[in-house]
Amino acid sequence: MQVFVSLLLVVGSVLLFLFTARQRDFDHADRLALLPIESEEESSEDK
């Protein structure tokens, strides 16, 4: 019974991962990571 439940959890997590990867939900995080670099470059150009 425990093996069956754990297999269901693994299959469910893989399906959720594939769904979110297909929706491209995580592309936004890459752009947010670069925002501090852009703001530092802009502030050094203003001086």
Image: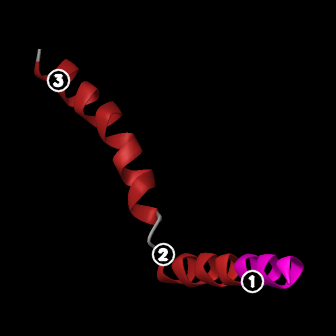
Disc 3 crowd rating (10 Å Cα; few below 14, some 14-19, many 20+) is: few
**Inter-mark Cα distance, 1 to 3:** 48 Å
**Inter-mark Cα distance, 3 to 2:** 31 Å
| Residue pointed to by mark 1 | 11
Q: Which residue is situated farthest in the front direction here?
A: 1
Closer to the chain start, of discs 3 and 2, is 2
Residue 6 part of the magenta-drawn span: yes
Quadrant of res 27: bottom left
Asked whether, in this view, residue 44 is left or right of residue 47, the answer is right
Q: What is the three-letter code of the residue carrying label 2?
A: Arg
Q: What is the three-letter code of the residue carrying label 1?
A: Val
Identity of the residue drawn at 88% across and 78% down: 3
Identity of the residue drawn at 20% across and 30% down: 42
In magenta, the rendered stretch is 1-11
What is the x, y in percent for residue 24? 48, 75
What is the x, y in percent for residue 9? 71, 78
Quadrant of res 5: bottom right
* Camera-side residue of 7 and 16: 7
Closer to the chain start, of discs 1 and 3, is 1
Quarter of the picture containing the N terminus is: bottom right
| Residue pointed to by mark 3 | 43
> Helix, strand or loop at disc 2?
loop
| Residue pointed to by mark 2 | 24
Disc 2 crowd rating (10 Å Cα; few below 14, some 14-19, many 20+) is: few
Label placed on residue 41: none
Identity of the residue drawn at 44% across and 71% down: 25
Q: Are marks 3 and 2 in contact (CB under 8 Å)?
A: no
